[in-house]
Image (cartoon, rainbow, N blue to C red):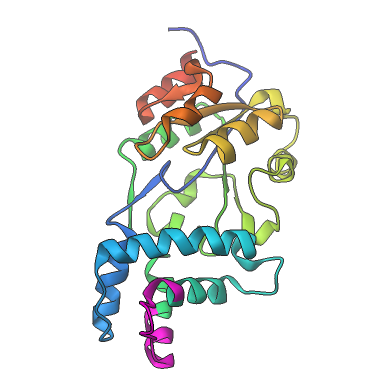
Amino acid sequence: MSVINPRFKLCTFDVTNTLLKFQSTVGDQYAKVGRMYGVQRDPDQVSRFFSHHWKLMNLNHPNYGRNTGLSSHEWWKELVRRTFVTGSVELTRNQLDSISDHLYNLYKSNVCWKVEPGAETLLKHLKQKQIVLGVISNFDERLDSVLKSNGLKSYFDFVLASYLVETAKPSKKIFDLALQQISCVTASQALHIGDNVKLDYLAAKKSGWNALLFKRPHIEEESLKLVDPNDIVFDTKQIEEFVLYS
């Protein structure tokens, strides 16, 4: 194997479905918490409602409401309300507050997350090669807590949560901001790794970066036509081989 590729002086990662995965589906987790406060919902229905309203909330209040006057907590509370409403069945204010607060706090712990197999070993090996490591994620202000509670925060030289830096992928601004965190690294020496074709792979490429797409089951085959096959990886070991030995 060849020595480390000198062009990769900086590696950044997405979080959800890249470094971390959910312990259970959103439907299962939400329905479980709902039952704790007397609200019975079918997990599959919850998943469908969540997915539908997630898209609407992101359309009308992007970046967790950062630019439309909502706090991220308020943003999530509204999404919880919409997810749990079935027909004319409304939650009481107490139920809504209890469920949304419970979920908001739960998802910043390690209860709802699990580390992607091999991810910590990957970060450790890249760190040993003195590669600067960072996070670029469309996430709210809980990101630091999520990374800390799952044992990954110490590996990173910087963490950019879109809500806090007021710009989100696929904007070039957030990739430029990542380069500003360190000196003497150009876009051509940077590599971003994530699971979303538009928000991670194409966004990084359009910003002048190198990029890897972490292939996941949810990625539509049609969108893969936009990705160089040589830039597709299927596990953390392949990421390590690409970064260190390609």
Q: Quadrant of residue 121?
A: top left
In the image, the segment drawn in magenta is 82-99
Q: Which of 126/223 is in front?
A: 223
Residue 191 drawn at (x, y percent): 59, 29
Q: Which of 109/96 is in front?
A: 96
Q: Residue at x 29, y 75 (%)?
A: 33
Q: Is residue 80 left or right of residue 227?
A: left
Based on the picture, tell me whether residue 78 belongs to the magenta stretch.
Answer: no
Q: Is residue 97 above or below residue 162?
A: below
Q: Is residue 111 visible?
A: no
Q: Residue at x 35, y 29 (%)?
A: 235
Based on the picture, tell me whether residue 87 belongs to the magenta stretch.
Answer: yes
Q: Quadrant of residue 241?
A: top left
Q: Is residue 7 visible?
A: yes
Q: Is residue 219 above or below residue 101?
A: above
Q: Residue at x 25, y 82 (%)?
A: 36
Residue farthest along the top direction in this orientation:
1
Q: Is residue 237 above or below residue 69?
A: above
Residue 30 drawn at (x, y percent): 32, 69
Q: Which of 62/240 is in front?
A: 62
Q: Residue at x 55, y 57 (%)?
A: 139
Q: Is residue 184 left or right of residue 194?
A: right
